[in-house]
Image (cartoon, grey):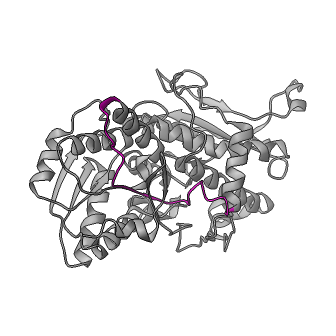
Amino acid sequence: MKDGNCGPGRRIILIIFVLTCALSCASPARATDRYVLGMSAAFTGPSGGLGIELYRGSMAYFIPLNADGGIGGRTVEIVTMDDGYQPDPVVENTIEFLNAEDIRCLFNYVGTPTVTRILPLLNGYKGGRKLLFFPFTGAEPQRQPPYKPFVFNLRASYLQELAGLVERFVSLNRSRMAVFYQADAYGRGGWEGARRALEAKGSKLACEATYRRGARFEDSMARQVEILKQAEPDVILSVGSYAACAAFIRDARDLGLDVPIANVSFVGSEHLLALLEGAGREQGRDYTRDLINTQVVPSYEDLSLPAVREYRERMDSIRPAPPDMADPGYRPLPYSFTGFEGYLNAKVMAHILEIYGKNPGMGLGRAAESVKDLDIGIDAPVNLNPSRHQGLDRVYFTTVRGGKFVPIDEEHWRSWQK
């Protein structure tokens, strides 16, 4: 594998937690002493915060695991490569991972347009065949044939998130729904999920508007707002990234589109909120009202859950650094839904590696498929088997209160009754 020179913004960074005694060794650690995971994700650009926080959350689990001896004496390491949330770089990164003998599997990839592009490679590109574990996307292609055998998902799907939103809003007599979405595989998948859910309720989409991937918060979404406003929707379902969705919310409120706006989990709640609060301070407006974000992990404010307490304690004590390729001006978040998802991804990955380490002949896939009723501390067991490559199904609903996204109670839901 090439080391250090993979083009601007794409050099490989080995993030290795090394015990003090190992630092004094003259010879480097062998691949057999490590489980190395390859992670291609957005670490730069308008979606860079997602990859950074997903990585940091995973490292909050792996760093103390390695300090305690690793898994059967083997440390777990993540090799990161930046793809900027763009399809072409992720293909190049993945080919490099597939050709690298020390990369055990792919892990923590971020985004539908990137993941869907590399799925054909997983089935043996030039003899390189490796599994992808726990991508940060709820899209359908990796959950269906022919690619389902090569991918293990932990999170619920976008279809489940959107079905949950439609169910809730229809019960509130809000069935005239429009969709704002990213014009690619991610957004189109969300559009399809919304369409299906509404069709099951005997309704259909009132209107739709799109934007191009890579849009920034500074960009205007006024045209998209005007398109949707003409249809007089009573809910907007938003399927996009945090910079574009925040720009849309800002412009929607400025142009008088004052209906609930619901985003799916990929949006990155904390980054979305930071942009809206910053704009609100400048304009003297509240851009955070009537927002609903679905999540695929519980709130990191729910201290009744053991995994939440673990995650917060480790983030507080370790404060994992972003990869070196990240923007030097990036300010790491203390906690985030994305980071907590990364933490849980690492926790389940470690369990699979432990099973695999005791019986390497079974392979990582069979080891993963043997996971049954695994308690990871969130009051929802993880189950995987040959016919089920998705560990969790639960969808959570949050809204903004006190400067945070918090769980929505029934009283708050009723406030949106039409």
Res. 370 image quadrant = bottom right
Q: Residue at x 29, y 70 (%)?
A: 417
Residue at the outermost front position: 284
Residue 25 visible: yes
**Does the image show residue 94?**
no
Query: Measured from the top left, where is residue 310 in percent x and y?
Result: 72, 53
Residue appearing at x 73%, y 38% in the figure: 318
Q: Which residue lies at the image location 30% right of the left edge and 69% below the top edge?
A: 169
In this view, the residue in front, 141 or 122, is 141
Where's the N terminus, which quadrant? top right
Q: Position of residue 77 (x, y in %)?
A: 69, 40
Helix, strand or loop: magenta stretch: loop
Give whichever of 338, 74 is nearer the camera: 338
Left or right: residue 146 compared with residue 301: left
Placement of 16 over or under 37, stated as above or below: above
Q: Residue at x 70, y 40 (%)?
A: 316
Please indicate whether residue 284 sits to the left or right of residue 388 in the image. left
Quadrant in which the C terminus is drawn: bottom left
Above or below, comparing residue 201 to residue 181 in the picture? below
The x, y position of residue 201, in whole percent, is 25, 78
Give yes or no for residue 40 being in the magenta stretch. no
Q: Who is closer to the viewer here, 394 or 172? A: 172
Across the whole image, how many numbered discs are drawn on residues? 0
The magenta segment? 282-305
- The answer to whether residue 320 is above or below residue 10 is below
Toward the viewer: 146 or 279?
279
269 relative to 55 in the view: left or right:
left
**Which x, y percent locates residue 64?**
78, 44
Q: Is residue 213 left or right of residue 341?
A: left
